[in-house]
Image (cartoon, rainbow, N blue to C red):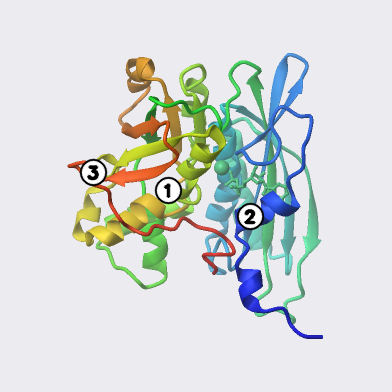
Amino acid sequence: MAKRPDSKIAALSEFALIARYFTRACNERQGVGDDCALIDVGAQTLAITTDMLLEGVHFFTQADPQALGHKALAVNLSDLAAAGARPRCFVLGIAIPRPDEEWLAAFSRGLFALAEQHRCALVGGDTSRSTPVEMVNGGRTWISITALGEVDRASARGRSGAQPGDDIWVSGRLGEAALALAIRRGQRQLPSPDREACLRRMDWPQPRVGLGLALAGLASAAIDISDGLVGDLGHVLERSGVGARVTWPTVPRAGFFEQLDVATQQQLVLAGGDDYELLFTAPVSRRAAIGALATEQLALTRIGQIEAAPGLRVVDGSGALIEATLHSFDHFVSGP
Ligand code: ADP
Ligand code: MG
């Protein structure tokens, strides 16, 4: 049988694929398309999210298993934070090529340290041997976590509440995890200790759970930045039916980005994934209350404004449009 032309397969992006094949109407408060599903149960709302980490796709074979245990849960708690939910419990699916006890001990140490910090108990899961080692070079480890959180009905939020005139805020700093990936791939260099700081951002993301809870009643919409600012803000704009203007010089980044040319800085900071900061929108009247939530450890920065005209406009300090082609991560378009 003739093979289908590759171009036809490559044309389908991750999000087009989800929209076409996995999105159907449902009666729940929030189904496919947001950071969490929102299920009303009595007076409470249950927030549910799932994320997987796949060896060779999301992490290198040599990755520190303790960091991996941390990150597998952190990326899920980050989605709960976006929805404004308090972590309650999680289930773990794991497939490994062999029962390596040293690896398992370190993995579970990293996993439970974060779970205990957020009082989020592991309540079930599934374990399997993955593709036998002799069939795949080195085997393939696959980790999938589904996390559940609780939120008051009135405080639950998603990507769809942004209104024209709202401020756009971002927590922390962006771009370091993407720079770390470039360092690991040998494409960029950075002197110590900035190098280690960047690698830590990639390996040990800190889910902004406390901030997510504190934004109840303040943020009109939120998303966690997992695939890059441009793409993730794009999801908020699309689902809210609005547009936005983002001022590039205000987007928070570490001082050492100055050493890179501007195009590289913009690619890493505006489109680099894996930061797990929160991006949220809020009415101008909430500026002071949100500003008061910033701490020495976690800055909160206004980077632009929601506008009625659809589309995202990134401008420089003088207001001129930046004509950069920025692509956030897409599993099928970006490729490995
Ligand atoms: P996040 O980055 O917050 O984990 P994604 O952007 O990866 O979310 O996913 C977009 C939306 O598509 C989410 O609501 C997610 O639950 C949903 N989704 C992704 N894959 C599937 C699938 N196979 N079946 C149903 N829903 C899916
Ligand atoms: Mg998310």
Check the picture and name the quadrant holding the N terminus: bottom right
Which of marks 3 and 1 precedes in the sequence? 1
Which of marks 3 and 2 precedes in the sequence? 2
Check the picture and name the quadrant holding the C terminus: bottom right
The span from disc 2 to disc 1 (Cα, nearest Å) is 17 Å
Residue 259 placement, left or right of 7: left
Few, some or many C-alpha atoms within 10 Å of disc 3 (few <14, some 14-19, many ≥20)? some
Which of marks 1 and 2 precedes in the sequence? 2
Task: Tell me the quarter of the picture where residue 301 sits.
Answer: top left
The span from disc 2 to disc 3 (Cα, nearest Å) is 32 Å
Comparing 300 with 108, the one in front is 300
Q: Is residue 333 above or below residue 234?
A: below
Badge 3 residue CB within 8 Å of ligand 2: no
- Residue 254, percent across and down? 27, 47
Residue at the image position 77 percent from the left and 75 percent from the top: 132
Residue at the image position 60 percent from the left and 51 percent from the top: 69
- Please name which of the two marks, 2 or 3, marks the residue nearer to the observer: 2
- Residue 99, percent across and down? 73, 65
**Which residue is label 1 attached to?**
230
- Residue 106, percent across and down? 59, 55
**Which residue is label 3 attached to?**
249
